[in-house]
Amino acid sequence: MKILFITPASALRRFPPYRLAGKAYGQANSITGPLILGGILKKAGHQVEVYEELNGSVPYKKLMDADVLCLYTMTCSAPRAYELADLFHKNSHARVLIGGMHASALPEEAARHADQVIVGEGESVILDVVEGRLTDKIIRAPCPKDLDALPFPDYSILKTPCKSANVMSTRGCPFCCSFCTTSRMFHPYRQRSIDSVIEELRYYKRLGFRYMNFEDDNFTADRERAKEICRRMIEEGLTFKETFFFGRTDLAKDEEMLDLLKKAHLTRVLVGIESLNQKSLDAVNKHQSVEDIRNCTAVLAKHGIRLIASLVLGIDTDTKEDILHSVDFVKSCNAYQLQDAVLTPYPGTETYKQMTEENRMISTDWTVFDMMDVTFIPKNMSPWELQDLFYSASLRFYNFKSIPAIWKAFGAEYGLRRLAMAIFFRLGVLAARGASHNWKSTQMYKLRHFDAKELRARVGPRFT
């Protein structure tokens, strides 16, 4: 059978200027799930192709002869997935399978557009579903316990551009922040053997990748394990030009690990700072202190590891002043990049449950559940005030004055990337603020013109 895997992207993310800005942010990579599942099917003798809409155009007219279409959903891409499912049902004979995080949280919704929905991690069921041995409309896949038994992602079936290989050395996270989706999709926390991880790195070296990402939710959760992986990478010549990973502030407590991370070229880390307000950290179950944050940023700078600082904007206990203080802090410690994410109540999370119970949701248009758009009524400001604060935070961080410091700290390549980000953010914010005045169909316009009577009815008179 001819089988397609497509990871959809929203219209904004398919917009060429957005793709161009993405190149300034980092190297193009591909979600591992479809590459693993596709590899299983290829090994069984099927013809498999994988496409990522974020990274390139997809020749849909040439693909209508497919027998099976598999769609991976994130929440913001779910409407696009449903659009593609309906398109293939109309114009081809393909059976449509839908899986991924959003479909796992809302399988009945996805089932309205799919022949079958796979909930959870699909490696143990994908072959039986495709070959017709599992026929239930909604299939709940058992959690794989032995990660070493799973195949590596098969990059030979990927048809859209990719410059960075992804490795998942663990699945899940020992922590469970209230807004996080991945700790619920990938549960419980599981580890692969170090030998398995090293063998996968050898595979990517043979394929010629120069960049690599550890896609674990928290690569340094087990510090001794992380150190041993780094030692093996160094000893066996398995370092890449640059390796990205996710970490927590507690990584700064192990100087030996930091030295090994730098030597193994794990030099770009996203750390969930979220807020410089301790009440807010406690409110989202972050299990870290403001002092942990301050120590971590200082230690990363000392070791020359570039920090991507993640902030969550709109936590109930944060005011506008708290948010701007957090932005100024990460700017002052020469964070390389800022991921300022609007608090987003994703289905299946505690945040979604809270906002729904408190009647604070203002949108169920999944396309705007992208961490860039306000979808709920905040406690300390109006929806538009939070939205505009997101724009202000980006401009405040990516200003032109910050470029020389980044250039000096990390070199010309990264100074030029910061320059590009500063330009792209200014153009993007200009367009968004313009749309908020003139483009009635956009979320920005709806937020700016949010009905004051509805605000009063839901949360009282504090915004009017």
Image (cartoon, helix red, strand yellow):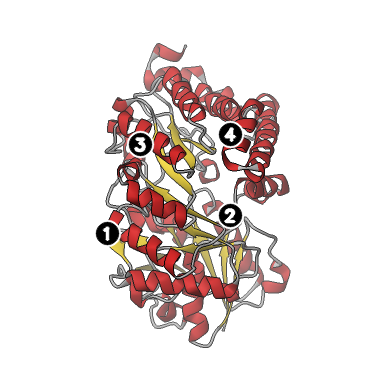
Residue on which disc 1 sits:
188
Secondary element type, mark 4: helix
Q: Which mark is residue 443?
A: 4
Mark 4 in CB contact with mark 3 (< 8 angstroms): no
In the figure, is residue 95 to the left or right of 420? left
Q: First in sequence: mark 2 or mark 4?
A: 2
Q: Which residue is mark 3?
A: 356
Q: Amino acid at mark 1?
A: Pro
Sequence-wise first label, 4 or 1: 1
Compare residues 18 and 443 and report the one nearer the observer.
18
Does the CB distance between marks 1 and 3 fall below 8 Å? Answer: no
Q: Residue at point 71% right, 67% down?
A: 59
Label for residue 80? 2
Residue at figure coordinates x 56%, y 75% from the top left: 206
Q: Are marks 4 and 1 in contact (CB under 8 Å)?
A: no
Secondary structure at badge 2 equals helix
Question: Are dots 2 and 3 in contact, CB under 8 Å?
Answer: no
Task: Looking at the image, tell me whether mark 4 or mark 3 is earlier in sequence order.
Answer: 3
Residue 27 occupies quadrant: bottom right
